[in-house]
Amino acid sequence: MAIKSLKIRRNPLSSTDYQIDFLSKGIFEDGSFPSFEEKIKQNNLDYLSPKNLEILQLNLGYMCNQVCSHCHVDAGPDRKEMMSREILEKSIEILQQTSINTLDLTGGAPEMHPEFRWLVENASKEKIHDLIVRSNLTIIMANKRFYDLPDFFASNNVHVISSLPFYKKEKTDRQRGEGVFSKSIDALKMLNKVGYGKEGSSLKLDLVYNPSGAFLPASQEILENDYKEVLFSEFGIEFNNLFTITNLPISRFLEYLIASENYEHYMSTLVNSFNPSTLSNLMCTNTLSVSWDGNLFDCDFNQMLDLGVESKVKNIKDFDLKLLQNRKISVSQHCYGCTAGSGSSCQGTIT
């Protein structure tokens, strides 16, 4: 089957030159696959709508000490976007005034934000269940000002979720850069030393697996067992859970799919693997994603495609929970990635 003529548009949120316009109705010329919106209706839903808002996810900025090949944020050392103190203070205020139970800090490397420690210290004082920092691990080893991050995380009871593409050096370095695996192992040892991931400890350390190519992740349970066995036997490293996340056709991964002529195959895989049982627990139903400039999105993938929330409330400065709860969730063809197989979310598989 032939790929439908691709509409191309500039992506203002990315240094990537171009993004495929996923807003077109179909994927292929012969119409063999429906749009994601049509797929929802085929499963007796008019549209996706929010449940109770549980997670506030803040993208503090796109600056990162790494340039990973699969990064859907297109993060790197040259990115200058940073969330303002005003937006950070508004986020704390929202935690105080709502029943949101999780604050999820991401980037880029969120630790590189100049107000990162202020935010963590103040958020840890609020009555939330989970304070997540999504760390790339190597930031801990980047320079001396980050060496104390494990102790800082522990003192504020931060839940650390860290990307480690594989438990072997070759695959990890191929995806994230030469030397990343060794630095990640050193950082994990430092986290273990202060109690993270250890049996009986309240300090949670979870790892994230992203496939290195145009395929779906293997079983999360099986991969977790393999990770735990290898990392402990070879390095003495312990952690709590492994989350497998499907790569979505956005930014650098999209560039890879097109350059390697895998786009048609990968999209076919996602669509043919659609699992309707994932729809009720998609992360967009209980999460609100906030970009560095305060704009609101149903998820961080929508954020990268500039698909803002369908609500009168567009920015966190005008936050209104009642209005946001009554919105229709924005979807497009990339959403097939979160509904393929066992499903995918920032917390791993869905079913």
Image: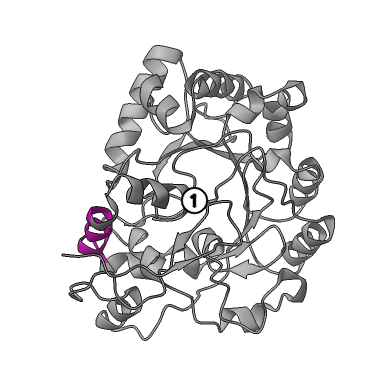
Asked if residue 216 is among those painted magenta in the image, a careful observer would answer no
Q: Quick one: 273 or 193, which is closer to the camera? A: 273
Residue 168 visible in the picture = no
Q: Does residue 77 sit above or below 32 in this rendering?
A: above
Q: Is residue 258 left or right of residue 64?
A: left
Residue lying at 75% horizontally and 61% vertically, measured from the top left = 91
- Structural crowding at the residue carrying mark 1, measured as other residues with C-alpha within 10 Å and reported as few (<14), some (14–19) or many (≥20): many
Give coordinates of residue 296: x percent, y percent: 63, 69
Query: Circle 1 is placed at which residue position?
Result: 72
Give coordinates of residue 191: x percent, y percent: 60, 25
Residue 114 visible in the picture = yes
Which residues, given as a range, are shown in magenta? Answer: 265-275
Residue lying at 64% horizontally and 22% vertically, measured from the top left = 141
Give coordinates of residue 346: x percent, y percent: 48, 52
Quadrant for the N terminus in the image: bottom left
Which secondary structure, mark 1? loop
Q: Main secondary structure of the magenta part?
A: helix
Q: Quick one: 330 or 262, which is closer to the camera? A: 262
Give coordinates of residue 254: x percent, y percent: 40, 52
Q: How many marks can you see?
A: 1
The image quarter containing residue 315 is bottom right
Q: Quick one: 21 or 218, which is closer to the camera? A: 21
Residue lying at 42% horizontally and 78% vertically, measured from the top left = 48
Residue lying at 37% horizontally and 60% vertically, measured from the top left = 338
